[in-house]
C-alpha cells in the first residue's frame, strides 16, 4: 500500500459497474448480528453500485413519524427472539465475487439521504451518565429542516422501562411530551453508525461492539464523500450496512446519535493490492485510523500502533512516525457506549510532499 498526500488517494479510477437496488425487507435484513453462514441478499461484482435502505431500530420511538408500511413489515415479521444478540437492523449481506480473506473492500459512500423528516435520540441505560440522571431513560425526537440542513428538537419524553427489546414501540401521549432544546439547531450530517464484513467466527456476532470487521464504529465522518476500507474475513466479504444516523458528536455520550433511516448509495471495489488490519477511513483531508479496546487507553494504543503502520507505508521510520503522531495528529474518542470503546486518530494528508513513496 502507498500512503498518499492531499490530492492523491488510495482510490484508483474505476469504471462504475452495474447498479443494484437493495431494499430493507424482512428477507433482506438481519437484526442484531453478523453471521458468516448467512446467505447473501445480493451478489455483485467489483465496481458495482448499490442503492440500499438502512433502517434504524429506534424508529419505534415515534412510529407515526419514523415508520411506514415497509418498516412495519420488518417489525411484524422479525420476532423479538430473532433480534439478537445485538440491536441494529442490518441490510445485506452483500457477496462480492472473488473476494477472499485478506483482501480489502473499498467502500465509497456516495450519497446518504434521510428517509423521513424525524429522528430519535435516546438517553439510555448504557449511556455514560445514566446513574447521574436517576436511572431514567429519555427520548428526544428531532425534526429535520432540509432548507437549513439542521435538526431541532420537536419534543421529549421520559421512559419508565429500560430499552431492552430491540425495536421497542412507544406511543407517547401528547400530555407526556415536553418541550426541549428550544431555539437550538443541530447540524445534520448523515452517516452510518454500523457497517462491515462478516467476522470469521462460527455463529452470530453481535452488532453492538466495533471490531476489526468494522461493525458499530459510530464515527460521524463515515458519510457521503468518505471511503472506508474493510479487510475481508470470509469468502465473498458478506458486507452489510445499518444503524443510520443523521447527527452525532464524538463520544455519543448519552447512548445514541440522532437515529434515523437513510437511503444510501455506495460503490464496492475489491482490492487485492494492499492490506490493512483495522477499518481505515479516507476523507478529503484526512486519513483516519480506528482503534478499539476494553478501555480508552487500550483503544488509543491500538489506534496508535495501526497509525504507525500506515505512516510506515509513507516511508517514515517508526521513530519519525511516533514524533509526527504527537505533533500533527488528533486522537479523539469515537464512542464510550458500545461495550468495546473506540478511539480514532486523524492524520492530515496535506502535510506530506506530493509524489512521495515508501522507500525500497
Image: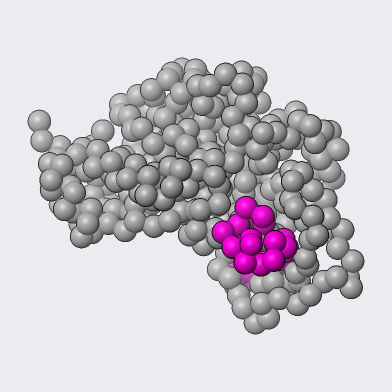
- What is the x, y in percent for residue 85? 67, 33
Residue drawn at x 62%, y 67% as measured from the top left: 132
Q: How many marks?
A: 0
**Residue 253 sits in quarter:** bottom right
In this view, 253 is above or below 273: below
Whether residue 27 is visible, yes or no, is yes
Left/right placement of residue 28 relative to residue 357 reads right
Confirm whether the magenta stretch covers residue 345: no
Residue drawn at x 15%, y 42% as measured from the top left: 318
Q: Nearer the viewer, residue 230 or 215?
A: 215
Q: Nearer the viewer, residue 315 or 336?
A: 336
Residue drawn at x 71%, y 76% as measured from the top left: 180
In this view, 148 is above or below 198: below
- What is the x, y in percent for residue 65? 80, 59
Residue drawn at x 48%, y 59% as measured from the top left: 250
Region of the chain picked out in magenta, as a range? 124-151
Q: Quadrant of the N terminus?
A: top left
**Residue 137 sits in quarter:** bottom right
Amino acid at each position: 500500500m502507498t500512503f498518499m498526500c492531499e490530492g492523491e488517494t488510495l482510490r484508483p479510477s474505476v469504471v462504475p459497474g452495474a447498479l443494484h437496488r437493495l431494499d430493507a425487507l424482512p428477507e433482506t435484513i438481519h437484526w442484531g448480528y453478523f453471521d458468516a453462514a448467512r446467505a447473501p441478499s445480493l451478489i455483485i461484482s467489483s465496481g458495482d453500485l448499490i442503492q440500499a435502505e438502512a433502517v434504524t431500530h429506534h424508529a419505534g420511538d415515534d412510529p407515526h413519524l419514523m415508520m411506514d408500511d415497509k418498516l412495519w413489515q420488518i417489525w411484524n415479521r422479525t420476532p423479538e427472539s430473532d433480534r439478537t444478540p445485538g440491536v441494529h437492523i442490518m441490510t445485506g449481506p452483500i457477496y462480492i465475487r472473488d473476494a477472499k480473506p485478506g483482501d480489502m473492500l473499498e467502500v465509497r459512500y456516495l450519497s446518504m439521504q434521510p428517509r423521513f423528516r424525524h429522528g430519535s435520540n435516546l438517553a439510555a441505560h448504557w449511556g455514560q451518565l445514566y446513574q447521574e440522571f436517576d436511572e431514567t431513560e429519555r427520548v428526544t425526537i428531532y425534526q429535520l429542516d432540509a432548507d437549513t440542513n439542521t435538526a431541532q428538537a420537536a419534543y421529549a419524553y421520559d421512559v419508565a422501562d429500560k430499552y431492552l427489546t430491540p425495536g421497542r414501540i412507544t406511543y407517547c401521549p401528547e400530555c407526556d411530551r415536553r418541550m426541549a432544546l428550544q431555539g437550538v439547531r443541530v447540524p445534520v450530517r448523515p452517516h452510518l453508525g454500523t457497517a462491515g464484513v462478516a467476522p470469521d467466527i462460527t455463529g452470530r456476532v453481535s452488532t453492538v461492539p466495533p471490531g476489526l470487521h468494522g461493525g458499530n464504529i459510530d464515527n460521524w465522518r463515515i458519510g457521503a464523500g468518505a471511503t472506508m476500507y474493510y479487510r475481508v474475513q470470509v469468502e465473498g466479504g458478506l458486507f452489510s450496512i445499518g444503524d443510520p444516523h443523521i447527527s452525532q458528536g464524538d463520544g455519543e455520550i448519552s447512548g445514541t446519535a440522532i437515529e434515523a433511516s437513510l437511503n444510501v448509495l455506495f460503490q464496492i471495489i475489491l482490492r487485492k493490492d494492499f492490506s490493512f488490519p483495522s477499518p481505515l477511513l479516507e476523507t478529503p483531508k484526512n486519513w483516519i485510523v480506528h482503534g478499539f479496546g476494553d478501555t480508552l487507553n487500550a483503544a488509543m494504543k491500538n489506534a496508535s500502533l495501526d497509525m504507525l503502520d500506515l505512516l510506515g507505508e509513507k516511508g517514515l521510520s517508526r521513530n519519525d512516525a511516533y514524533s509526527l503522531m504527537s505533533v500533527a495528529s488528533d486522537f479523539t474518542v469515537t464512542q464510550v457506549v458500545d461495550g468495546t470503546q473506540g478511539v480514532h486518530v486523524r492524520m492530515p494528508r496535506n502535510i506530506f510532499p506530493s509524489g512521495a513513496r515508501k522507500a525500497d
